[in-house]
Image: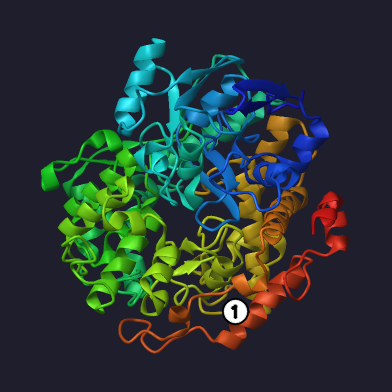
Amino acid sequence: MPKGFVGKVLRVDLTEGTTWVEEPPESWYRTYLGGSAVVAYYLLKELPENCDPLGPDNRLIFATGPFTGTPLAGSGRNNVGAKSPLNGGFGDAQGGGFWMAELKKAGFDHIVIQGRAESPVYLWIKDGEVAIRDAGQLWGKETKEVEDRIREELGDERIRVTQCGVAGENLVRYACVINDLTHFPGRTGMGAVMGSKNLRAVAVRGTQNVEIDDMDTVRELARRMSQEVNDGTRAASLKEHGTAGGVMGLDAGGGLPTRNFQFGDFEGAEKISGPTMTDTILVDRETCHACPIFCKRVVKTDAYGGVDPIYGGPEYETIGSIGSNCGIDDLGAISKGNEICNKLGLDTISAGMVVSFAMECFERGVLSKDDLDGLELNFGNGEAMVALLEKIARREGVGDLLAEGAARAARAIGPQALELALTIKGQEIPMHEPRYKHGLGIGYAVSPTGADHCHNIHDTVYENSADAVNVFGVIDPLPIDDLSGEKVRVFYYESNWKHMLNSAVSCQFVPWTKREYVDGMRALTGWDTSVHELMKAGERTATLARAFNMTCGFDDRDDELNDRFFTAFSRGPLEGKVIDRGTFNKARVTYYHMMGWDDLGRPTSSRLDELGIDWVADLL
């Protein structure tokens, strides 16, 4: 059994009502690590051609990594994947909390679920024992009631629960998975896959310890991080104001998404900023397993009928998506929208982008008040936003159309709507502006999941210092609007590193240096690993995901940005500035070549050999 892992994969067939256990060799664990790579591995190995993402043949995969459930900060991360119902390609999402650490303590590294139960069920896993239990009494309930009922039924308040929410039951294509009520693997519609299998929840309780090779080193790394976070030398802003601490900086630079990305500056930015939240509606801070940062917000307000702090509070992505990008400067409305998404199971990024898309359609006369069930869906209308989120989660009225995602909705509405639906590979854009961060735009385009900010770079990190990547030999700072070969090299290194983090299942907000990360991996597993090996693990992950997308019909024509991002802003700090399409296209091909892909983005057989995944060539 490899150290740092349990050594067991739980297999579940919901159609047959059976479970079994696989025990891969240590070489398999070292090759794929866990998380995103394990998701891609099973999707490539087991999905039939033209598999329906919402059909029984799809696999829903919960995958830990070597960091999961250890004393190291960032080890509470959760990874879940499947073929995405949002875009029909590689689906993968990460979130925090305590659920996945509990899964490892309960005796499994991963769960691979296939089939579809005849009626609603939930999985109950405790110290290696597995049961498929009736969930009829849970169907249609909000997330808090589901968690409470499971704990009451099983008689243990320490049980951890992940679930799909009402939106997942209703097959909203961007429904998320919910861990512990306040942590969300949000992207690519994994909640809808869970709902399609009639699987409402997975409850886990574990008391087993995972064997670690060098616990003294692990404890020393954990102690050092905790001390430096607490004395303010690491992650100080994140601890104080959470991810929302960056709102004002983005606004000042012209990179705060506003009114469906029409602008990059928002007149109400200060009203929705992290410091304002801290000073007004913040009532507590929460964290994930073993993390000293406590970046999670907990808010309470009487606005909009009251916001329950049990559902936490809005992160930056939510403040951007249902705040500035909908023209809304009311923290009460944003917090209520966040609560609705959390208790019903919507990805706040896609949900907010769908609402802002509908708002622009309304303001341009593409959709009328009658089309929107009587809603006056102007930018800035918080009440309409809150009402529309409820409709989407429950597929009521116009919510049924918008539950399909912006791309599908635009095709149904007509040609005038197409240019207003800001998606890449069918997934809505996160709250980071590619006209502000040009390298990030390349990352959006080539992302295997569609537009994503978590296996991407943020150019502002390298504007004044290249310290984040100088371990790879990148020494000089680079402008944020640079798309030279050097910037592509930085993206190549950093995106592969982040793909590795998503396979090791470790939080990217924890400021481990790359050398510390290698020390941690060595201490956990006993492997004589290196920065180079971990980089290759990330590159392997990205290439596996690319290969899966190719089997689903994606090609280089899908690696594109929306036309809006090649159009200059008409106001603000970036007025008149634009991404040059020719430079963008050249940078994209440069990235392909760095990855060992051909001019059309197809992995070459020699690179598959070099990565130790030559078996993929037969699938391409």
Residue that lies at the very extreme toward the bottom in this rendered image:
576
Judge whether residue 431 can be spotted in this image: no
Q: Where is residue 586? Give x, y as percent.
A: 66, 82
**Image vertical order of residue 219 relative to residue 538, above or below:** above
Rendered residue at 49%/39% (across/down)? 196
Count of labels in the image: 1
Residue nearest the observer in this picture, 356 or 447: 356
392 lies left or right of 415: left
Amino acid carrying mark 1 in the image = Leu
Q: In which quarter of the image is residue 576?
A: bottom left
Residue nearest the observer in this picture, 306 or 276: 306
Residue nearest the observer in this picture, 449 or 35: 449
Q: In which quarter of the image is residue 161?
A: top left
Q: Where is residue 385? Give x, y as percent.
A: 22, 58
**Image vertical order of residue 474 relative to residue 306, above or below:** below
533 lies left or right of 166: right
Rendered residue at 59%/45% (across/down)? 82
Residue marked by disc 1: 483
Rendered residue at 33%/71% (across/down)? 260
Q: Quadrant of residue 32?
A: top right
